[in-house]
Image (tube, helix red, strand yellow):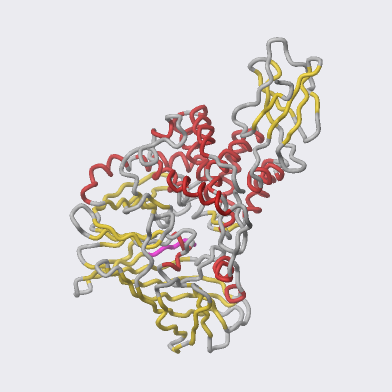
Amino acid sequence: MKHRSLLFAVFQLFYLNVVTAQAPVFTRDDTLRGSITPERAWWDLTFYNLKVSVNPAAKSLSGSNEIHYRVLKPNTVLQVDLQPPLLIERVEQDGQALTFNRVGRNAWYVTLSKEQRPGAREHITVWYSGKPLAARNAPWDGGFSWAKDGAGQPFVATSCQGLGASVWWPCKDHMYDEPDSQAIAVTVPEPLMDVSNGRLRRTTDNGDGTRTFEWFVSSPVNNYGINVNIAAYAHFSDTFQGEKGPLSLDYYVLPENLEKAKTQFQQVKGMLEAFEYWFGPYPFYEDGYKLVEVPYLGMEHQSSVTYGNGYRNGYRGTDLSKTGWGLKWDFIIIHESGHEWFANNITYRDIADMWVHESFTNYSEGLYTEYHFGKKAGAEYIRGCRGNIENRSPVTGVYGVNAEGSIDMYYKGGNMLHTIRQVVDDDEKWRAILRGLNRDFYHQTVDGAQVEAYIIQKSGKNLQKVFDQYLRDTAVPTLEYRVKKGRVEYRWTTCVEGFDMPVKVTLSKGKYDFIYPTTQWKSSPCKLSRNGSFEVAEDFYVYSKNVDAK
């Protein structure tokens, strides 16, 4: 999903200095957006049929959405979300107009007339229109990006993670519930085209200077993963022979960048090869893989990954790890595509667990590097990213109010996973865990606790305190040590209560072995060798401190 720029990180540092002295204050709107309200809980989303006309000249849109659902228990009020300045014009069920009213800023309560019987399959149709929120700095604040290509043609795209899909279309805007499939029909002026998620079913010339592009997503899809990308695109394609057979690869770019794209996008096959090795088959063979140029940096829209990294390696030409390895590959191609496994296949139920998306996908950058350049290179890249960790607030956010955790969900989360790999100390088992996550949580929404429990179970390691330390605390565990009569004594400090993570250290020169510290002083099983020094293996994200040193 979204990756924040270095400028944004500086802004966040300023913001945290101002506000962290007091507890966050949440409003009713936050609860309506971020919780499973009674008006959401009684119905199970099954299908969206979204139809929207986009007018780039007026920066406006109008359309409708059929919201199909299965009744779980009787109720007469259904919550739909749509953010201002967009307005709902009318709502119908079975051709009958329904009453509706806005509750707070973004929620709309629709009052149903017919009896809602458990097990029944129903739908409502919502018509809406207006000028959607324009993104000021996509994708971080989200909305519509209205731009022009080099020929002066409209170049338009959406992005809305965190802010919510309801910024541009009416939906059940909570991550816990996904439709089983979705249709997306987008009407645009000629000669523009729309690229959205899934596969293009048909293109219709409407005879009025507009065309309609009808896309269909056959897999469950999260709301913010749905996107509209509008331009006078050039298209080329390829095929990847993957674990589940041939996977279609489609690329949509501005004509002025076609030749550059044909070169830069060759990295896609290497990305798929690496990630299928580590995570299992690409999760959306039925819907294909697309990489689409947009007027912002990029995002992980399901089967319609967006790209705006300027056709250069690194993150806008820089290496976030400062090791050199990050310039060997295009950050947006690798990172945003990695989200197809962690974000789009496995999706958080609450944005407070956004680490499930970002920690694993940050970690995937190191795994990609390892696959193509060796284990040492991958580890160096991950360790290099530690310089970006802030440790100012926890990785996890506040549940039930649409509040994500800190920016440390990226680099700290990636280093947490790299550290856990060292604790597991079995690369094949670790790879099996990563593949197992994508198999056993295939096309599902999850709580972060489920992912933690899965890794604990499959690794056979008691890692709960490790997760508590790195996800829910800001301190980095410090291994204090001292030497007495040739033996090293050690303990964990600056850590959560009960922290007992094993760690590899040297007691003799060049040889690493596990020790099992707790928060109480313990002694090494053997003496420090004459030419040895006590060092912690650098792949563990911990600090060490010689308390005898002056």
Main secondary structure of the magenta stretch: loop
Indicate the position of residue 317 as horizontal and vertical percent values. Answer: 35, 38
Q: Say whether residue 349 is magenta.
A: no
**Rendered residue at 59%/47% (across/down):** 436
The number of numbered discs placed on residues in the rendered structure image is 0
- Toward the top, the furthest residue is 530
Tell me which segment is drawn in magenta. Answer: 216-220
Indicate the position of residue 458 as horizontal and vertical percent values. Answer: 67, 44
Indicate the position of residue 77 as horizontal and vertical percent values. Answer: 56, 82
Relative to residue 316, is residue 79 depicted above or below? below
Q: Is residue 221 visible to the viewer in this orientation of the structure?
A: no
Image quadrant in which the C terminus is located: top right
Q: Say whether residue 218 is magenta.
A: yes
Q: Nearer the viewer, residue 330 or 409?
A: 409
Is 99 on the left-hand or right-hand side of 190? Answer: right
Relative to residue 18, is residue 524 depicted above or below? above
Relative to residue 534, is residue 17 depicted above or below? below
**Rendered residue at 77%/41% (across/down):** 498
Q: Nearer the viewer, residue 550 or 488?
A: 550
**Rendered residue at 21%/59% (across/down):** 153
**Rendered residue at 66%/53% (across/down):** 449
Q: Is residue 413 visible to the viewer in this orientation of the structure?
A: yes
Is 541 on the left-hand or right-hand side of 13? Answer: right
Relative to residue 496, is residue 96 depicted above or below? below
Is 176 on the left-hand or right-hand side of 149? Answer: right
Indicate the position of residue 220 as horizontal and vertical percent values. Answer: 49, 62
